[in-house]
Amino acid sequence: MIVRIMGEGQVKLDDAHFVELNKLDDELLDEMESGDEAGFRRTLSALLDAVRRLGAPLPDDSLEPSELILPAEDATLDEVRQMLSDDGLIPG
């Protein structure tokens, strides 16, 4: 799957990594619902770090369609809330 982190670029992620990413996504959703700003910041950073660590960066000049778009690390709680689906940021 091709994943874009807003403001950074794209990475290619193997589907096997989505179990780990979904755990972080669930934590992020819980923190957003409870208004835990510190937890939200920590988990968003951990989620994006995991995508960077597990994914293979695509070249900057690559124009692959992104199947998933994640917020930038400095995104606000409200900005992330607008990006959510019923499953959180990551489907599944």
Image (tube, helix red, strand yellow):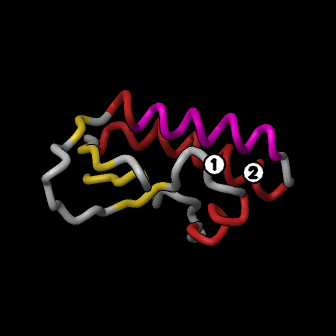
Asked if the residues shown at circle 2 and circle 1 are in contact, with their CB atoms under 8 angstroms apart, the answer is: yes
Percent position (x, y) of residue 9? 31, 49
Q: Secondary structure at mark 1?
A: helix
In reply to whether residue 47 is colored magenta, the answer given is yes
Q: Is residue 52 magenta?
A: no
Q: Which residue is mark 1?
A: 26
Image coords of residue 17 (percent x, y): 36, 37
Question: Of helix, strand and loop, which mostly describes the magenta segment?
Answer: helix
Q: Position of residue 8 (x, y in %)?
A: 38, 47
Q: Residue 25 at x, y = what percent? A: 58, 48
| Amino acid marked by disc 2 | Asp
Question: Which residue is found at the position 26% from the left and 41% from the top?
Answer: 14
Q: Tell me the quarter of the picture where residue 42 sits.
A: top right
Judge left or right: residue 42 versus residue 2: right
Q: Residue at 56% of width from left, 70% of height from top?
A: 85
Magenta span: 37-51
Q: Label 2 belongs to which residue?
A: 30
- Residue sitting nearer the eye, 92 or 73: 73
Considering only vertical position in the picture, is 92 above or below 54? below
Amino acid found under the numbered disc labelled 1: Asp
Please tell me the numbered disc located at residue 57.
Answer: none
Badge 2: residue crowd in 10 Å (few <14, some 14–19, many ≥20): some
